[in-house]
Image: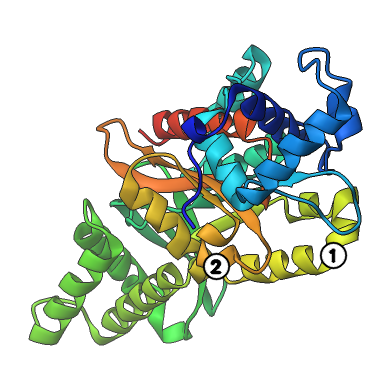
């Protein structure tokens, strides 16, 4: 059965449907006819309201849980409300200032992504998600510094100012002039290149004998490159914060749904695939319940938006996940504003 459109509903049915959805999103509880009868704008008897509620239920827009005489929106009802009736509430000046202030703090981009995920969680009361861009930074310098007789500190500096450190365990024979030679060689070959590009160039030069490195330096270069590339490949592509927000008082009555959701969030690869769908769409996406296969068991909703660099290129996606009773009117513009603010931070 096709879901009804807004034009299929009478003015009276629209008003009652809107009040039920807004009441449910606000409280998380089904809304009864007595509650609706108390709304002065309706001016209808409880019996007349019950008739309209029954019709909306027959149309598949509302449902009546066994434990309550009230009604709550179905996934189809939520979709109709979000697409045709919702009036978004723009972030307040305080919320906009908090978002911009958190994202303006200096530091590596990874920290900004962590902050963004935590910020979305704090502001929405749900779990925040940010997918790290799948692009490698271009490098500016690699330096190798001895720590003791068998350890070296490898420092990688990106063109964006991001710095990462690794400790390499080496034999004493690799230190001294070999260390300086390897450090100079790596900086010359990595400057302006991604790590993958530099690794291909280094291996090609070493294999062809054109590297002009002694044996100890070659071994050091190869081990350093291998450590960096392996580490880069294993980095998570998804940052999720605020899972504890999903365990609110309302969750106690539906603990299996929440347990299912937490299990789904552990499958980061599948969550990343979901967010990539929003990224490819290049626009805000709202997935309600079973509309998204990944979260069909937990009946959760995802609000996701791509974020762009200063050139307008989509470089990643961020969003919020929580129960279907998310405050869509508030969270949707908040996610959109955060995506735009993060894009300015990335540059």
Asked where in the image residue 329 lies, by quadrant, the reply is: top right
Which residue is more in the foreground, 326 or 22? Answer: 22
In this rendering, position of residue 65 left or right of residue 271: right
Which residue is more in the foreground, 161 or 243? Answer: 243
Compared with 3, 151 (above or below) is below
Q: Residues within 10 Å of mark 2 (few under 14, many from 20)?
A: some
* Residue on which disc 1 sits: 255
In this rendering, position of residue 194 left or right of residue 166: left
Which residue is more in the foreground, 194 or 184? Answer: 194
**Image x and y of residue 176, in percent:** 39, 73
**Image x and y of residue 306, in percent:** 40, 42
Name the residue: 26% across, 81% down.
218
Q: Residues within 10 Å of mark 1 (few under 14, many from 20)?
A: few
Asked where in the image residue 284 lies, by quadrant, the reply is: top left
In this rendering, position of residue 297 left or right of residue 216: right
Colour theme = rainbow
**Image x and y of residue 132, in percent:** 45, 53
Name the residue: 35% across, 37% down.
308
Give the SS element for disc 2.
helix
* Numbered label attached to residue 64: none
Numbered marks: total: 2
| Label 2 – label 1 distance at C-alpha | 18 Å
Give the SS element for disc 1.
helix
Compared with 199, 339 (above or below) is above
* Residue on which disc 2 sits: 294
Name the residue: 50% across, 27% down.
337
Residue 111 seen anywhere in this rendered image of the structure? no
Which residue is more in the foreground, 232 or 192? Answer: 232
Which badge, 2 or 1, is on the more N-terminal residue? 1
Name the residue: 34% across, 73% down.
225
């Amino acid at each position: 059965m096709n879901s009804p459109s807004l034009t299929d509903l009478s003015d009276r049915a629209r008003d009652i449907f809107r009040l039920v959805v807004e009441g449910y999103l606000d409280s998380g509880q089904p809304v009864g006819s007595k509650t609706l009868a108390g709304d002065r704008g309706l001016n209808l008897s409880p019996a007349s309201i019950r008739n309209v509620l029954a019709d909306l239920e027959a149309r598949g827009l509302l449902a009546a849980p066994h434990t309550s005489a009230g009604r709550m929106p179905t996934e189809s009802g939520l979709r109709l409300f979000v697409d045709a009736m919702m009036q978004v509430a723009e972030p307040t000046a305080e919320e906009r200032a908090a978002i911009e202030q958190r994202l303006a703090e200096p530091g590596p981009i990874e920290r900004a992504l962590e902050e963004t995920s935590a910020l979305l969680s704090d502001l929405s009361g749900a779990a925040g998600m940010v997918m790290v861009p799948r692009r490698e930074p271009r490098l500016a310098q690699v330096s190798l510094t001895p720590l003791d007789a068998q350890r070296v500190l490898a420092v990688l500096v990106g063109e964006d100012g991001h710095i990462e450190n690794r400790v390499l365990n080496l034999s004493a024979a690799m230190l001294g002039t070999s260390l300086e030679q390897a450090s100079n060689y790596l900086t010359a070959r990595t400057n302006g290149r991604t790590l993958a590009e530099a690794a291909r160039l280094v291996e090609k030069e070493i294999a062809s004998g054109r590297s002009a490195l002694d044996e100890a330096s070659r071994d050091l270069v190869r081990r350093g490159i291998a450590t960096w590339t392996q580490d880069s490949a294993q980095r998570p592509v998804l940052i999720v914060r605020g899972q504890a927000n999903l365990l609110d008082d309302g969750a106690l009555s539906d603990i299996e749904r929440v347990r299912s959701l937490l299990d789904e969030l552990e499958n980061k690869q599948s969550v990343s695939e979901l967010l990539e769908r929003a990224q490819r769409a290049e626009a805000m996406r709202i997935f309600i319940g079973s509309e998204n296969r990944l979260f069909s068991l937990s009946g959760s909703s995802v609000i996701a938006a791509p974020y762009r660099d200063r050139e307008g290129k989509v470089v990643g996606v961020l969003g919020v996940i929580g129960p279907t009773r998310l405050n869509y009117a508030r969270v949707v513009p908040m996610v959109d504003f955060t995506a735009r603010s993060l894009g300015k931070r990335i540059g």
